[in-house]
Image: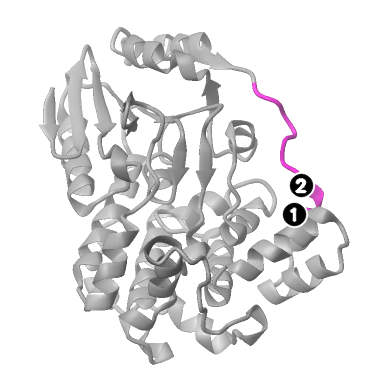
C-alpha cells in the first residue's frame, strides 16, 4: 500500500482501491488530494493490471463512515480574504478530475457512505456504480455558502427527474439512500455492516467479466422504498416556473407545511446565488458535461472575482457564506442583496459570460 498524504492507494487482484484519508475534515478535498487522485486514475487508466477502481472515505475510527464533505471551504475563505489566486488552480484541476471520472473507461465503484456533499458528489456522480447506505447523507448545499452547485452539479442535477434538479440546487436538501436512488443520483444500496465484505470481495472478481460485477452487486445490494420524495408533484409544479421569483411567489400561496418549510429554506440562502444556480441548471440541461464544466469554471471565477458587482474577494457572497457557516458559526450571513426580490437580471447575467477567450480557457482541451 502506498500513502500519498491524505489519499491511500492499493492494487489487489485486478482492482485499484482508493481511500480518502482526511477524516478530521470529513475528507474535504484539498488541491493536493485532487492531484493525487488525478495522477492515480491516469496511471491506472493505462495499467492493464488494473481493470476497475473502488473509492471510499474514512472516519476517525477507520474506513467508511464518511465519504467526502466537499472542497476545503476554509481554504477558500482564507484565499478570498487574502486575494490569493490559489483557488484558480483548485477549480481547474477539480473539474478536470470530475470529467476524468465521468469518462473513465473502466468500472469505477464509489462507496458513497455517510456524508456525500459538494466535491464528494463530483468524485462519485461520474462513477459507473454508485453505492449508498442507510447512513448516506447526500446534498449539493452550495447556495448556503454563497456558491452554486459546481463539480458538474448543473449537469447531473439537470438530469434528475422532472424539476427536482432545480429544487435540489436551490434548497440544498439532504437526501438519504432511497431518495438518491429515486432521483438517479445513486444505483444501489448496501447495508453498513456489509461495506467491508463488499470492499474485500471486489478484489476477487474479474472486472473483464461483466457477470462477475453484476453478481457482486446482487450479493451486496438491498431493496429500498420507492416513492420516497416528499411533495414530488409540488416540486415539479413550482420549480418548473420561469424564474426564482415566480417559484417563491407560487410557494407562498401554498399553505402546506412543505411549502412553508421550502420558503424558509430559500430565505436562508444567498438570494443572488439562488438566481445564478437556477439559471445554471436551466442552461445545463442542454449542455454536454464538458461544456457545462467550462460554464461552471467561468461562474466560479465570477464568484471569487465579481468585478461586475464592484466587490473584492473579501466582500463576496462566498466569503460571507463561509464566514457565517464555518468561521464565526453564527449562521447569520449578511447577503447582498438581502432578499430574492432585490436581485436584478443585470446582477446574474455576467456570471454566464466567460472571462476567457475560447482558445485560452483553462478547460479548453476538455471534450
- At 21% across and 14% down in the image, what residue appears? 12
Q: Which region is colored magenta?
A: 224-235
User: Horizontal and vertical percent for residue 46?
Assistant: 16, 31
* Residue 153 position (above or below residue 102): below
Q: Position of residue 4 (x, y in %)?
A: 13, 36
**Disc 1 marks which residue?**
235
Given residues 269 and 96, the one toward you in this image is: 269
Q: Determine contact: label 2, label 1, CB under 8 Å.
A: yes
- Specify whether residue 237 is in view: no
**How many numbered discs?**
2
**Main SS type for the magenta part?**
loop
Image quarter (top left, top right, bottom left or bottom right) of the N terminus:
top left
| Mark 1 crowdedness (10 Å alpha carbons): few <14, some 14-19, many ≥20 | many
User: Would you call the spot at circle 2 few (<14 residues within 10 Å), some (14-19), or many (20 or more)?
Assistant: some
Is 232 in the magenta? Answer: yes
Q: Can you tell which quarter of the image residue 338 is in?
A: bottom right
- Is 83 drawn above or below residue 33 in the view shown? below
Taking 90 as reference, is 275 left or right? right
Q: SS class of the residue under badge 1?
A: helix
> Callout 2: helix, strand or loop?
helix
Can residue 340 be seen in the rendering of this structure?
A: yes
Name the residue carrying label 2. Answer: 232
Relative to 87, say whether 69 is above or below: above
In the depicted view, which residue is nearer to us: 132 or 58? 58
Outermost residue, bottom direction? 310
Q: CA distance from mark 2 to mark 1?
A: 5 Å
Amino acid at each position: 500500500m502506498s500513502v500519498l498524504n491524505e489519499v491511500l492507494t492499493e492494487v489487489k487482484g485486478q482492482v485499484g482501491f482508493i481511500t480518502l484519508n482526511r477524516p478530521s475534515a470529513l475528507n474535504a478535498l484539498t488541491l493536493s488530494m485532487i492531484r493525487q487522485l488525478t495522477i492515480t486514475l491516469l496511471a491506472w487508466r493505462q495499467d492493464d493490471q488494473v481493470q476497475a477502481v473502488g473509492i471510499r472515505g474514512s472516519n476517525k475510527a477507520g474506513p467508511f463512515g464518511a465519504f467526502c464533505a466537499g472542497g476545503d471551504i476554509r481554504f477558500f475563505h482564507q484565499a478570498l480574504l487574502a486575494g490569493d489566486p490559489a483557488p484558480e488552480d483548485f477549480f481547474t484541476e477539480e473539474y478536470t478530475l470530475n470529467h476524468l471520472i465521468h469518462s473513465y473507461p473502466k468500472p469505477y465503484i464509489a462507496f458513497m457512505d455517510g456524508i456525500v456533499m459538494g466535491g464528494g458528489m463530483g468524485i462519485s456522480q461520474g462513477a459507473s456504480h454508485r453505492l449508498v447506505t442507510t447512513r448516506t447523507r447526500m446534498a449539493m448545499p452550495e447556495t448556503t455558502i454563497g456558491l452554486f452547485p459546481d463539480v458538474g452539479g448543473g449537469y447531473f442535477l439537470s438530469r434528475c427527474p422532472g424539476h427536482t434538479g432545480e429544487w435540489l440546487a436551490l434548497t440544498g436538501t439532504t437526501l438519504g439512500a432511497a431518495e438518491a436512488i429515486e432521483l438517479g443520483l445513486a444505483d444501489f444500496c448496501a447495508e453498513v455492516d456489509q461495506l467491508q465484505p463488499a470492499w474485500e470481495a471486489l478484489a476477487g472478481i474479474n472486472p473483464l467479466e461483466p457477470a462477475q460485477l453484476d453478481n457482486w452487486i446482487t450479493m451486496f445490494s438491498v431493496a429500498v422504498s420507492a416513492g420516497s420524495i416528499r411533495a414530488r408533484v409540488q416540486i415539479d409544479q413550482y420549480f418548473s416556473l420561469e424564474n426564482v421569483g415566480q417559484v417563491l411567489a407560487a410557494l407562498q400561496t401554498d399553505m402546506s407545511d412543505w411549502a412553508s418549510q421550502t420558503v424558509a429554506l430559500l430565505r436562508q440562502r444567498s438570494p443572488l446565488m439562488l438566481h445564478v444556480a437556477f439559471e445554471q441548471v436551466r442552461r445545463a440541461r442542454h449542455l454536454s458535461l464538458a461544456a457545462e464544466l467550462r460554464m461552471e469554471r467561468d461562474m466560479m471565477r465570477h464568484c471569487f472575482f465579481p468585478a461586475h458587482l464592484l466587490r473584492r474577494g473579501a466582500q463576496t457572497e462566498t466569503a460571507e457564506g463561509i464566514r457565517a457557516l464555518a468561521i464565526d458559526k453564527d449562521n447569520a450571513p449578511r447577503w447582498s442583496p438581502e432578499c430574492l426580490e432585490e436581485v436584478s437580471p443585470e446582477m446574474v447575467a455576467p456570471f454566464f459570460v466567460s472571462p476567457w477567450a475560447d482558445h485560452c480557457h483553462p478547460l479548453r482541451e476538455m471534450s
